[in-house]
Amino acid sequence: MFMQIAIGAIGIGIVLMVGYLVIAQVATQIQTSSPDAATNASIASTQATVFAGFALIAVGIIVLAAFGLINIFK
């Protein structure tokens, strides 16, 4: 069960990393072509959402490791 959760967390992490790379590339291209304040704000909001996803995955992995250690020493 823990292996399935770990594989799921890794999959979500990969999706978030690809999303972050796409957002970073789009932000670079848009900011050079049209520096609109609303566009910059929406890109910053999207990046903040991706960072929150990274934090949730990190917390999930820490909890997964804690449960794994509890089961090992049980």
Image: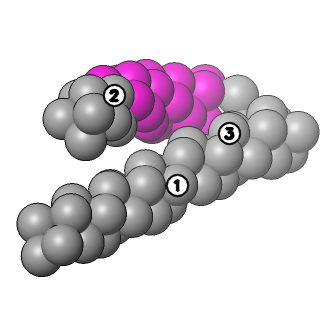
In this rendering, the label closer to the viewer, 2 or 1: 2
Q: Is residue 65 magenta?
A: no
Q: Secondary structure at mark 1?
A: helix
For badge 3, the amino acid type reads Thr
Residue under the point 59% across and 54% down: 52
Characterize the local packing of mark 3: few (<14), some (14-19) or many (20 or more) Cα atoms within 10 angstroms.
Answer: some
Q: Residue furthest front?
A: 74
Instruction: Please provide the residue range marked out in magenta.
Output: 10-33
Looking at the picture, how far across and down is residue 51, in whole percent? 53, 53
For badge 1, the amino acid type reads Leu
Q: Which mark is residue 46?
A: 3
Mark 2–mark 1 distance (CA, rounded to whole Å) = 13 Å
Mark 3–mark 2 distance (CA, rounded to whole Å) = 22 Å
Q: Which mark is residue 56?
A: 1
Sequence-earlier tag: 1 or 3: 3
Residue under the point 54% across and 47% down: 53
Q: Is residue 11 visible?
A: yes
Q: Which residue is mark 2?
A: 8
